Amino acid sequence: MRRRERALLEQAKLVLDFNWTGGYTKPGPRLYPHQWSWDSALISIGYSHYDQDRAESELLHLFDAQWRNGLLPQIVFNPSFGDYFPGPGFWHAQESPDAPRNHRTSGVVQPPVHATAVRLVYERARDRGRAREFLERAYPHLVFWHDYLHRERDPRDEGLAYIRHPWESGMDNSPLWDAILQRLHLREDEIPSYRRVDVHTVSEQDRPTSAAYDRFAYLVRLFATHGYDEAAIREECPFLVQDVLFNSLLCRAEADLAELAPEIGEDPAPHRERARRTARAIDEKLWDEEHGTYLDYDLAAGRPIHVYCASNFLPLFAGVPDEERARRMVDFLEHGGFGLSDRRMRPVPSYDVHGFGFSPTRYWRGPVWINIDWFLLRGLERYGYREHSARLSTTIRELCERSGFYEYFDPFTGQGHGSVLFSWSAALLVDVLLAAADEAPSPRQP
Ligand code: GLC
């Protein structure tokens, strides 16, 4: 490794040190003071290269807050930070009989990338004895989590899980949700009263609008009113989406679980079968023949969501498309508004630059996110598109080196936005620098 890269690596580790709380890592110092679910999974991938202890604690701390029905919460609250919206008092999660008693949590989930993270942490661990103990502890939580998603979020047994809030997608403010949120006409007395704190920490221009926040809050109150009873929520919830990113990560996670199972004498077959089913369902129900990529499906309206985001290409990470479909997707990434062969842009913008309402700086509406680039680079690598995956790892390195470890970046100027010292940007940069391409896990084709 060259000197400049070594220096960058050390800076990334310092960011993680700065956000480390002793049990887990905060996503960012001020905007995100608690533990977030998919952040922790991605952060543990960074630690897996050099700190087995932290990598394991990060995930175990999250699993410790798992609900009794298997739900793995989006946020585990840090009791010493009261000034946060929406905090435990807004979620009322403890009104569910399934909520944990040892932690306060939110009542939604985030994308299921945890089994993939556990696999990397397990495989890279130096102390093999401890790694095995870790896997023995983590495995039942992962099975329980996936069982929850298949049981509660896939009522028609399609092989696809639904999300019921934009926050569950991990892409809170994506244009993917606009049509559904617009459909949601709220009278003034239907909007819960709340006070945002995010806009005091970062520029309001970069964050979701108040109209979107009203709807986010409305959905949370709907869940709380139903005491987090999934069957009751499903009946009434106007937001039910089979999301491409969420299901691609679930598919990949099941395949990774199948690889882990035999290590501790468990049966891989059910996980392999589930991975196959979800892969088939993504391929059959979500494929968009017209544009050559996958689309989210709005279950409440019964139709696909014709909005093109970088996340729509994540089936590559799970090995879902065949070679021909993958080629069409790469063609779209190159020649559509995603800039994979455009030297004036830092790929991949989170939203098609030609899309209606594209913004290079607004949260999930155009900026480059390191985690999405990381999923895509591993996916492109898997299909043999080495030049493209190399371009994405160079982009990740250059963005962090020139602008710092920001939460997201302007694809045209490279300038950083959102939270500073953002943990997953640092952790995935560590992975990009330290993982030899062939070291990345490639589970059997589901
Ligand atoms: C934002 C992102 C979400 C992330 C959280 C903490 O809400 O949209 O994906 O988990 O911040 O970093």
Image (cartoon, rainbow, N blue to C red):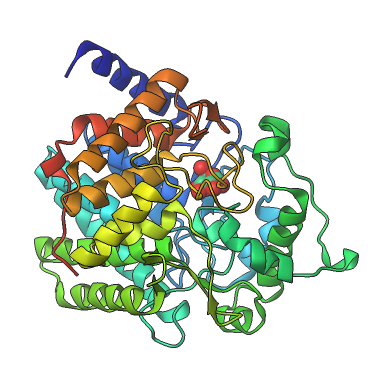
Q: Quadrant of residue 366?
A: top right
Q: How far across and how far down the image is residue 394, in percent?
A: 29, 30
Whether residue 168 is visible to the viewer of this picture, yes or no, is yes
Q: Nearer the viewer, residue 153 or 380?
A: 380
Q: Residue furthest top?
A: 3
Q: Residue at x 37, y 55 (%)?
A: 332
Q: Quadrant of residue 439?
A: top left
Q: How far across and how far down the image is residue 8, in percent?
A: 32, 19
Q: Nearer the viewer, residue 223 or 424?
A: 424
Horizontal side, residue 279 vs residue 99: left or right = left
Q: How far across and how far down the image is residue 176, in percent?
A: 56, 60
Q: Is residue 97 above or below residue 86?
A: below
Which part of the image, by quadrant, shows the N terminus?
top left
Which part of the image, by quadrant, shows the C terminus?
bottom left
Q: How far across and how far down the image is residue 413, in percent?
A: 51, 26
Q: Residue at x 50, y 35 (%)?
A: 407
